[in-house]
Amino acid sequence: MAAGTRSSAYSTISVRTWSDVDDDLAVVKRDLQAVSTLTNTSQSWVVSTPTTTSQPWAHGPEGVLIRKLRQELESQRTANLMSRQSLTNALTKADKDGDEYLSFQEFTAMITADLKEERRLAFRGMLLSALGHVGVLPKRKRDDFLANYTICPPPLFIPIITLVQVIIFIAYVVDMDKRGLTVTATDGYPTYSPLSYNPKRRYEVWRFFTYMFLHDGYLHIVFNVLTQLLFGFCLEIVHGWWRVAIVYLCGVTAGSFAHSVVDPWVGLIGASGGVYALLGAHLAAVVTNWKEMNYHLCNEEEFQSRRLFAAVRIFASAPFRLAMIVLIVLPDTGLAIFRRVALNENLRVGVSAHVGGFLTGLFLGIPVLRNINEHAWETNLGWVTLVVFLVVCAFAVFFNAFHTGYPPTDWS
């Protein structure tokens, strides 16, 4: 049966308003049976509100997240129909399997059997007022993280920011060559550039951000570019370019904040703050989507019938991501610590920007990135990490403003 037919059938329900409830409970049952018939035929239902409603309600057979449904119902100015406690009790009672989702079957049972008639009709009016505002991911996308990968729209932010960094690096290599300066594999950057973070010129606030466009030698930019392309692409095709952009740019800024507090006399260049924010964001995604990333990971049937796809599933799994993060973070951070402590001043690398960027990705990744199958504890944790991030950034700003241990300001 065509999806358009299903939508039309359900529109019969959604055009009714609270004034219709006196028609008879049989009207409700009749409409629900019509949708139920379509559900049994197609094994899934996709319904939309009529043209008078501005937003669609797209469903999978698993239902709607109860917490979001309750919030939406409470916001629709229908509190006079049912008290908040009664609403909570009704939804909790209807969730038979305790998975925090109200399935279509549970919804039908709640309307037709579990509630007294007056509450049943009241609930119907409240639901009808909220149909245009609540959305649900299809069940496969909730269960399988890989099902959320899409290249439409394609990744935008990571390719663009990478291209800009490469162009600026090449431009400065050419300019330094004209000035008689050499860029090697491990050394060479334009100390005269207005883009680098310079502790003597902290009043030029753009330097806390633009330092990411400069790199110290060929290996530095190659490592950062390859790492951010690898991990950034994987994030963008699931979470979208703007979420990744927020995490990356906040990681860059927080990296310079951390560096300015821990190493107040040392300059800073490189995109490591943003790169490590991507790594931290991957860890956040692993924490909140562990089950979904491991969907069918050890499925023998899939390994036999779809070997290539099964291999992709392994590379996209939570344990593999975790191993990749460890393999990149530990050696690179260890080398940075060695260069910071053991080598001469010209070869020193700031470590605090790595840490600041990674923690930013971890703290912002939870509230900013998409959570495929959201639970209440994850939402609460996201608010906590967001507040912690903002408080730490505020502290860094005040530290830069009032700390007297920085080198003398260069006003030239």
Image (cartoon, rainbow, N blue to C red):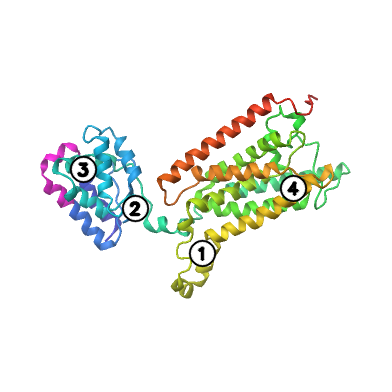
Distance CA(mark 3)–CA(mark 1): 42 Å
Residue sitting at 21 percent across and 52 percent down?
A: 109
Residue 193 in the image: x percent, y percent?
77, 36
In terms of sequence position, does the residue under pointer 4 or pointer 3 come before the other? 3
> In the shown orientation, is residue 198 left or right of residue 309?
right
Q: What element carries label 2?
A: loop
Distance CA(mark 1)–CA(mark 2): 25 Å
Q: In the rendered view of the protein, which quadrant contains the C terminus?
A: top right
Q: What element carries label 1?
A: helix
Residue 360 counted in the magenta span? no
State whether residue 154 appears in this view. no
Image depth: mark 1 or mark 2 in front: 2
The rendered magenta stretch, by its main secondary structure, is classed as helix
Q: What element carries label 3?
A: helix
Distance CA(mark 3)–CA(mark 2): 22 Å
In terms of sequence position, does the residue under pointer 4 or pointer 1 come before the other? 1
Q: Is residue 138 shown above or below 175?
A: below
The magenta stretch is 15-31
Q: How crowded is mark 3: few (under 14 residues within 10 Å), some or many (20 or more)?
A: some
> In the shown orientation, is residue 40 left or right of residue 194?
left
Distance CA(mark 4)–CA(mark 1): 35 Å
Residue 21 counted in the magenta span? yes
In terms of sequence position, does the residue under pointer 3 or pointer 1 come before the other? 3
| Tag shown at residue 341 | none
> In the shown orientation, is residue 86 left or right of residue 243?
left
